[in-house]
Image: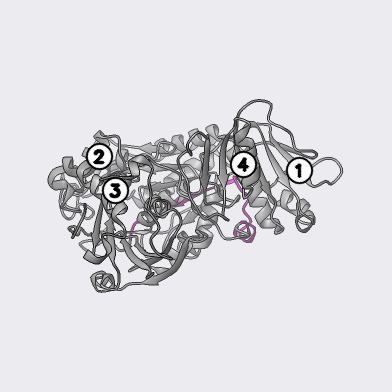
Amino acid sequence: MTSLTVVVFILPTWVAPLAYTSNLMSSNVGWSRVSASLSLLFYPGGGLGDSIVSLPVLYAIHEFFDGWADIDIVTGQNIEALRELYYGIPFVGDIVPCPPGAESVLAESYDAMVVANEQVVLQVKDKAQAYISDFVACVESGWKRRDAFGLANRVHNLLNNQLANHAVLLGLDRRSLPLYSMGMPNYHETMPAMQLHPGALDVLERHGLVAGQYITLQDGWDANFPLKTLDTRPTKVWPAAAWAALVVEIRARHPNMKIVQLGSAKTGGDIAGVDLNLRGKASLRDALALLKFAALHVDTEGGLVHMARGLHTRCVVLFGPTNAKFFGYARNKNLVPPCHNCWWMIQDWMSECLRGLDVPECMTHHTPAAVANAVSEILAENPAPRAAARYGAVPLPSSPGTIGVANNAALAMQFSAAGHAIIHFDLLQQKNIQRPLDGMAYRQFVARPSNLPVENQILDQLHFTADANANEFAGELLEALGVMKVGGQAVIHITAAARDATAAAFAKANLPPPAGEPAETIILARTA
C-alpha cells in the first residue's frame, strides 16, 4: 500500500480551499489508518512568536492522526531558530528551508496542504480526499463555525482587527482561534510543550546568574515586518528612554535582582544601566534558557512573551496597538492603555499612529513607575520557593489529588485506578492526549521533566527519574518546585548513574542537599 503525503502550512497569507467536505472529531473519532505512514509538512508563518503560537495546531494534527504522522517542518525564515523552538518534539522530523513564494511549488509534491494563521484552510488533491476524509470533514466543520466572521474570515491582515475583536466576543484568542477554525473540539488554550536542550543551566553559570534572581528585558520587534523607513521605531514599542528609567526603578526597589537584556541586534537598542547586556550576543538556545530561569520577563507584545509562556515564566507586557484580549495571557501582567487596539486599521499601523502623533500615546501612557509596580507585584506573588529534601520511601497520597508522572505508564495507570487525576509526561509513546480519556481523569503530554506543559503550582505530587547530568538534574529540581503546590512532593528515583550527580545538582539549584542516608528515592517537599 502506498504512503499518503500531506502538507500542513501555517502562512501569513490567505489561500482559498480547493476542497473541503462533517466533523468526526466531535465524536472523538480520529484518522482511520490506511497506509504504512502519513507524511506531513508543517509551515509556521509570521515571526518566531507565531511559531510558538502554532504549536497547539501542530500537536492537534499529530493527535488527530493518532501518532501515525511523520511530520517535517518547513520555513522561509531562520531555519536554525525554528530548530531551537521545535527542539525535542519527538514526532517532528526534518526542518527544511523554503524560499519565500515557493510554497505552491513545494506543495505540488504533496497530496494536501493546510494553511493556518489566525484561521485554517485545507487544500486536498482529488486523489487524496478519500484517504483523509475524516480530517477533511473536521476542517469543513471549522469552516461552518467561522462563516460568522464574514469578510474578515477571508481577508488576512487587512481585516485582522475585526477578526480578533469578533473572536474575543466568542471567548477565543490567538491560540484557540486556529484550532476552533479547524473544527477541533478541544480548542481552548493549552500550555505549549517547548523543550530545552540538556544542561540549560550552563548559560547561567557562564554569566554568573542564579535561577530566580534576575529579570530579563527586551526592547525589540519582528525584523521581518516591513516599516516605512529603516530608522522607524514601530508604534508598538516603548520609547528607549523609558527602558533606562525602568532599570533605575527596578534597581531601587529590588537591589538584589540582576537585570539582563535579551533580544536581537537587528531591532531596538541597548538599554542603559542593565547588569548584563546580551542583545545580539546570546543564541536563541541561550535566550530560551535565560527566559526559563528568570524571575520574570518585561517586554512589549511579541515573540519572547510567547516563548516565556511556553517556559512557565510570567511577564509584564506593555500593550499598545495590538489587542490585549486576543494576544495576552491571563497569567501575565498585561498593561493596557486607554487608547489601544488599532492594529491593521491601516496598512502602515506599525509605522505611524492613526491619530497622527509623532510618538503614539498608547506607549507613552506606560510610565516606568507603573511598569515597575507590575514587576513588584509579580515578585510578591511568586516568591522563590522553599523546599526540604530527604532520602526515603515513596509516600502514598493520603487523598485524591493531581499527580504528574514522567515516562512511567504503569505507575500512571496505577495512580489513576486509585482515583487520582493523572498527567502523564511521556516522551516514549510520542502521543499528546490533551483531553481526558473516557472514564479516566488522565491526560498525556509529550514532555521532559525539565519543562512540563502545565501551569505552575498545580501538582500535589510529581514522580520522575533523575538525569545523570548534574545540570539537567538541577533543572528538573527547579521545574518540580515550580509545578508543585505548596505542601506538594516530588518523588525522585535516583539511578546509580545519577547518584554521583545529586550533590552538584542540588547545589546548582540553590537547594540544601537531601537529609539522611543515600537511597534510591529522594522526596523533595515544597514548604513555601
Who's the residue at 52% across and 45% down the image?
A: 444
Who's the residue at 60% across and 58% down the image?
A: 200
Quarter of the rendering containing residue 487 = top right
Cα separation between marks 1 and 4: 19 Å
The reply to whether the magenta stretch includes residue 147 is: no
Q: CB of mark 1 within 8 Å of CB of mark 3?
A: no
Q: Which residue is mark 2?
A: 167
Disc 3 residue type? Answer: Cys
Q: Secondary structure at mark 4?
A: helix
Can I make out residue 342 in this image? Answer: no
Cα separation between marks 3 and 2: 20 Å
Q: Which residue is mark 3?
A: 138
Left or right of residue 108: residue 287: right
N-terminal-most mark, 4 or 3: 3
Disc 1 residue type? Answer: Ile
Q: Secondary structure at mark 1?
A: strand
N-terminal-most mark, 1 or 3: 3
Query: Residue furthest toward the top?
Result: 399
Q: Secondary structure at mark 3?
A: helix
Left or right of residue 244: residue 13: left
Please say if 103 is above or below 356: below
Q: Position of residue 157 (x, y in %)?
A: 20, 53
Q: Which residue is mark 4?
A: 412
Quadrant housing the N terminus = bottom left
Most foreground residue, 219 or 2: 2
Q: CB of mark 2 within 8 Å of CB of mark 1?
A: no
Most foreground residue, 373 or 402: 402
